[in-house]
Image (cartoon, coloured by chain):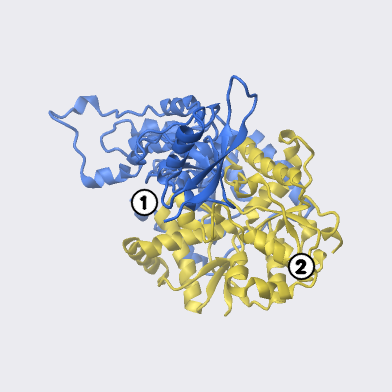
Chain colours: A yellow, B blue
């Protein structure tokens, strides 16, 4: 089955290397995906603050577009995935709300959300549909000896009933399982489920910086060579602002923050220079840099 | 129905002897269905009378027994022990973001003090006092049904990611309490209340981490209430905050082209005429430009963006 790839705004903007790496990884895995060039921003929880109902109409339109093509949606951003799952669950669990949203969707776009489309993040597709054993078979360059600190992103786990599909949202091991399958070693640290602070970057930069710096400090102290996240917003806050963390960290920060598909593509044999690793503010050193 | 041996790793702190906390292990035979509160009580009653903890009703009504189980706050009277065993162990800590006084008992003063900011009492219009009582229709009450269920257990306060880095933040329970009066049909101070919680350290400082709603043992679900307050502030035209301008930035870019313009929104959020704010964006902007990581200067537009414009044009109607 071909997936409808929902890129989200960052993969078309400040994190274009995420889209590049995703397409390379999907090609290596033989997973077909077609970019949804007509899908709108998920709202990121912000359009929802303008109008909860309008944001639901906006997202129901995206689901209707995928349904019209007979495709399931693949997200590459944890925030998009969480917002989509939250919206879809509300539509599916509340028939009156679904009817209201469909009425608006029909009036504005002449479309209708039926409730058939499945929505998953890239990493969930690998785990739940592609399969971990098949992924291991595709690994041609195991990331042996590389210590990777997974950073989930809030929308992957909280509030669990609304957004999460993890087996245990309070103590998930989905990313750890995938990191192991790629041959790398997952690093355990206290901040892996915390908020990176990106949503308040424009409202309270001090708080935002402290949250990201705490996460980077935790991963760095645990001996990680790199962090990896399925959320490009977490990536942006922890990578692009990392040179400013020195003021709130005990030690000098230097921890590359990879997009999850970049890590996958590396293990699948895609050369590092094709994955936009050089676009990151904090660059890789050591094993991965030489790939 | 056989009991299982479980090790409880319990945080201990004696202010007269300890400079910092330590863990003490207790082993109990736990029966299926037994609550963690029952286990903690048994540890105290059967093994170690020096252990201090708070509890009262045992029925998830009084809000006294919030503790961190394996790192996450919960009411231990409504949590079954066997659901939380990891490799034979349950770790118990006092709730977070508050100072431990002794063992599992914390100083709740900052939590109680935070409610003072939102004047948590009804302020009806004194000039329109009815002869008997102020009535509410079921529809009017429905708006505050969730926020009135708060039992002030402080589980949300404990795990709030913003409070971890900023003690000045109102906190989720306090904002939910503000919601309870902002949306009360009998209250006459709606606008002043809204203005107060949209100021610095209020609703716009919430980072959407979802911890509060995850830990909340009632239907209060603070994150959803915070979102409702934000929507009310937007609707009331209270747009003179970076948080509100951020929302407007989304409206003006997503609503036009379907995608966010990452160059425009930060500038819109800090304010077009806020020179210091604009300058603060420069370092990261230059760093990203140097790596070719800057968002495209000509913003992308999705195909069929007209449909999105139509959805946004209907917003006013939907907002009613």
Chain containing the residue with disc 1:
B
Quadrant that contains the C terminus of chain A = bottom right
**In front: mark 1 or mark 2?**
2
Residue B75 visible in the picture? no
On screen, residue B12 versus residue B176, left or right, reads right
Choose between B307 and A259: the one closer to the eye: A259
**What is the C-alpha distance between the residues marked 1 and 2?**
49 Å
- Disc 1 element: helix
On screen, residue B215 versus residue A271, left or right, reads left
Residues packed near mark 2 inside 10 Å, few (<14), some (14 to 19) or many (20 plus): many
Residue B16 horizontal/vertical position (percent):
59, 19
**For residue A10, which quarter of the picture?**
bottom right
Residue B243 horizontal/vertical position (percent):
52, 41
Residue B66 horizontal/vertical position (percent):
46, 37
Q: Which residue is mark 1?
A: B319
Disc 1 to disc 2: CB gap under 8 Å: no
Quadrant that contains the N terminus of chain A = bottom right
Q: Are marks 1 and 2 on the same chain?
A: no
Q: Residue at x 47, y 69 (%)?
A: A63
- Residue A267's disc number: 2
């Amino acid at each position: 089955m071909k997936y409808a790839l929902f890129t989200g705004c960052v993969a078309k903007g400040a994190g274009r290397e995420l889209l590049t790496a995703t397409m390379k990884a999907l090609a290596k895995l033989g997973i077909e995906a077609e970019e949804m060039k007509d899908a709108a921003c998920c709202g990121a929880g912000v359009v929802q603050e303008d109008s909860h109902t309008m944001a639901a109409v906006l997202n129901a339109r995206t689901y209707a577009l995928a349904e019209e093509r007979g495709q399931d949606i693949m997200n590459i951003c944890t925030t998009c995935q969480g917002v989509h799952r939250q919206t879809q669950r509300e539509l599916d669990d509340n028939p009156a709300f679904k009817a209201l949203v469909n009425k608006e969707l029909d009036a504005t776009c002449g479309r209708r959300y039926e409730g058939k489309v499945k929505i998953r993040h890239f990493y969930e597709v690998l785990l739940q549909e592609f399969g971990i054993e098949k992924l291991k078979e595709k690994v041609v360059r195991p990331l042996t000896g590389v210590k990777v600190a997974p950073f989930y992103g809030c929308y992957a786990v909280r509030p669990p009933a609304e957004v999460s599909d993890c087996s245990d949202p309070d103590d998930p091991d989905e990313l750890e399982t995938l990191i192991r399958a790629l041959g790398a070693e997952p690093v355990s640290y206290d901040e892996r489920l915390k908020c990176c602070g990106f949503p308040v970057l424009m409202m309270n930069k001090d708080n935002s910086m402290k949250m990201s710096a705490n996460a980077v400090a935790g991963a760095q102290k645990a001996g990680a060579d790199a962090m990896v996240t399925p959320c490009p917003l977490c990536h942006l806050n922890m990578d692009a602002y990392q040179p400013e963390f020195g003021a709130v960290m005990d030690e000098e920060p230097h921890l590359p923050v990879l997009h999850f598909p970049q890590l996958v593509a590396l293990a699948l044999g895609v050369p590092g220079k094709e994955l936009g690793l050089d676009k990151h503010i904090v660059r890789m050193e050591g094993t991965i840099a030489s790939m | 129905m056989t009991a299982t041996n479980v090790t409880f790793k319990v945080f201990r702190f004696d202010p007269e002897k300890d400079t910092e906390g330590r863990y003490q292990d207790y082993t109990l035979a736990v029966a299926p269905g037994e609550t963690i509160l029952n286990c903690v009580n048994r540890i105290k009653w059967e093994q170690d009378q020096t252990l201090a903890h708070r509890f009262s009703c045992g029925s998830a009504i009084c809000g006294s027994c919030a503790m961190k189980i394996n790192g996450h706050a919960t009411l231990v009277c409504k949590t079954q022990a066997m659901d939380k065993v990891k490799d034979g162990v349950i770790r118990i800590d006092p709730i977070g973001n508050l100072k431990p006084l002794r063992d599992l008992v914390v100083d709740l003063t900052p939590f109680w003090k935070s409610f003072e900011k939102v004047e948590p009492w009804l302020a009806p219009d004194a000039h329109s006092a009815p002869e008997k009582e102020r009535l509410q229709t079921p529809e009017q009450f429905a708006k505050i049904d969730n926020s009135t269920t708060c039992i002030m257990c402080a589980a949300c306060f404990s795990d709030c990611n913003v409070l971890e880095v900023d003690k000045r933040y109102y906190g989720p329970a306090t904002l939910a309490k503000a919601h309870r009066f902002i949306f009360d049909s009998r209250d006459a101070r709606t606008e002043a209340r809204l203005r107060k919680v949209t100021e610095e350290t209020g609703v716009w400082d919430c980072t959407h981490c979802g911890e509060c709603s995850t830990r909340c043992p009632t239907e209060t679900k603070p994150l959803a209430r915070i979102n409702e307050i934000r929507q009310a502030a937007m609707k009331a035209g209270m747009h003179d905050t970076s948080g509100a301008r951020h929302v407007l930035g989304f409206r003006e870019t997503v609503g036009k082209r379907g995608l966010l313009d990452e160059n425009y929104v930060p500038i819109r959020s800090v304010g077009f005429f806020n020179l210091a704010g604009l300058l603060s964006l420069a370092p990261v902007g230059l760093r990203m430009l140097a790596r070719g990581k800057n968002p495209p200067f000509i913003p992308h537009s999705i195909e069929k963006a007209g449909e999105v414009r139509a959805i946004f044009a209907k917003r006013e109607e939907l907002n009613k």
